[in-house]
Each structure stands twice: as C-alpha cells, then as structure tokens.
Amino acid sequence: MNITNLPAAEWDLISFFDSAREYAGTAGGGLLALMGTVGIIWGGVLLIKKLMASQQDQTSWIKILGLIFVGGALMAGGFNLIATIAEGGQTTIEDLGGGMVLLQGFLGSTV
C-alpha cells in the first residue's frame, strides 16, 4: 500500500469542530427520524384505541393528530426540518432586532 493513496487528514481544531457538527447533525437527524416513526406508531395506536373505546377514553383528538402530523414531519424531514425552523426563528429575531434599532432612531435616541 502506497502512503500517497491515503486520504489527507486534517488535525486542526476547526476541522475537528466541523466534523463533529456534521456527525452530530447526521446522528441527531437519525434520532429525530426514529422519534417521528415512534410518534406515528403511537398516534396510530391511540387513534385505534380511541375509535374502539367507549366514553372513558380521555385522549384528545388534538393529541392524536399532533402525534401523527409532527411524527410524520420529523420522520420525513429529520434534522433538516428542525434546522429550517431554527433558521426561520433566527431571521425573525434579526428582523425584530433591526426593527428595534430603527424604532430607537425614530424616537430620537442618540444611542
């Protein structure tokens, strides 16, 4: 085996954190997809139980639909779905922060 055929490895701190972020995203995405699958299954079980039970079943329809819809979204989207939601939150916070600066300038503050 020729040593020049081996892939180049980077051993600096930035590469370490980039690789750790990618690994955490992949592992976390798999975990979220698994949790979504469990949510769909549990929502289906509660749905069948609610349809077959009499009046004493206290599970709400909103909870059942939430488990099925959120579980399906997590199963299909995984980490990308959560990251997209977080990016939307970041944009909203930045917009609110920018609006607050404009409001301060509009009110005559010298800050």
Image (cartoon, grey):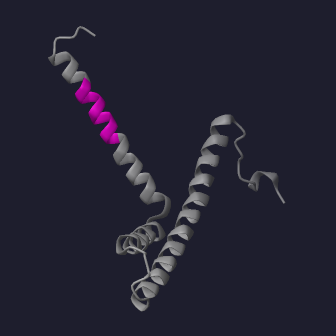
Q: Is residue 45 above or below residue 103?
A: below
- Residue shown at the point (25%, 22%) measured from the top left: 101
| Extreme residue in the bottom direction | 52
Q: Is residue 21 above or below residue 109?
A: below
**Residue 90: % across, % down:** 37, 41
- Residue shown at the point (48%, 70%) measured from the top left: 75
Q: Nearer the viewer, residue 71 or 6?
A: 71
Q: What is the span of residues highlighted in magenta in the rendered image?
A: 91-100
Q: Nearer the viewer, residue 53 or 37?
A: 53
Q: Is residue 110 left or right of residue 66?
A: left
Q: Is residue 26 left or right of residue 39?
A: right
Q: Nearer the viewer, residue 6 or 55?
A: 55
Q: Is residue 69 above or below residue 27?
A: below
Residue 32 part of the magenta-drawn span: no
Q: Is residue 21 left or right of residue 98?
A: right
| Extreme residue in the right direction | 1
Residue 94 part of the magenta-drawn span: yes
- Residue shown at the point (49%, 58%) measured from the top left: 79
Among the 4 quarters of the image, the one containing residue 31: bottom right
Marks counted in the figure total 0
**Residue 11: % across, % down:** 72, 39
Q: Main secondary structure of the magenta part?
A: helix
**Residue 49: % across, % down:** 46, 86
**Residue 30: % across, % down:** 57, 65
Q: Is residue 72 above or below residue 55?
A: above
Q: Nearer the viewer, residue 73 or 18?
A: 73
Quadrant (top left, top right, bottom left, bottom right) of the N terminus? bottom right
- Residue shown at the point (32%, 34%) measured from the top left: 94
Quadrant (top left, top right, bottom left, bottom right) of the C terminus? top left
| Extreme residue in the top direction | 110
